[in-house]
Image (cartoon, grey):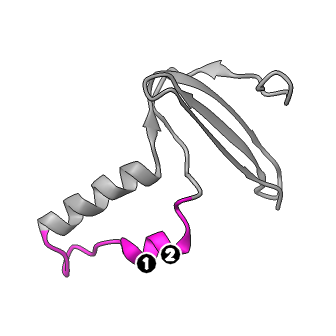
Amino acid sequence: MATNRGWNLSEITNQHSVMTYRMAPRMREKYPIPTSDLSTDAEVKKYRREMRTLRPEVTNGLWHEIRQSNGGGINVVFDRTRKRAYVRSSPR
């Protein structure tokens, strides 16, 4: 699939994260950004745990990214550990 679409996948040498489509405004409403003066440590930990599921961090896999001058582009990450691919595109 990657070759057919012209994606030149490279090894991930550092940690790479990709925003998933579940990061929609309704999810941000469900998990608002905690503020240090209003949130407890437990709330901050819960927020960070939830954000990791919405924005997976991959260290063992492949990636490809193209950015356009208008902010659009594509970000592809394949996680070997989870055996899952994440594709995020925006035509803008």
* SS of the residue under disc 2: helix
Q: Is residue 37 magenta?
A: yes
Residue 56: x and y in percent read 45, 43
Q: Name the residue tied to disc 1.
A: 29
The numbered dot on residue 42 is: none
Residue at 76% x, 22% y is 8
User: In the image, which residues are magenta?
Assistant: 22-40
Instruction: Name the residue at the left extreme.
Output: 41
Vertical position of residue 4 compared to residue 53: above or below: above
Q: Amino acid at mark 2?
A: Arg
Is 38 above or below relative to 72?
below
Is residue 27 rendered to the left or right of residue 72? left
Q: Residues within 10 Å of mark 1 (few under 14, many from 20)?
A: few
Against 5, residue 53 (above or below) is below
Which quadrant of the rendered structure holds the C terminus? Answer: bottom right
Q: How many marks?
A: 2
Tell me whether circle 2 and circle 1 mark residues in contact (CB < 8 Å): yes
Predominant SS along the magenta part: loop
Task: Name the residue located 50 percent from the left edge and 20 percent from the top edge.
Answer: 13
Dot 2 corresponds to which residue? 26
Q: Residue at x 44, y 39 (%)?
A: 57
Residue with the most extreme bottom position: 38
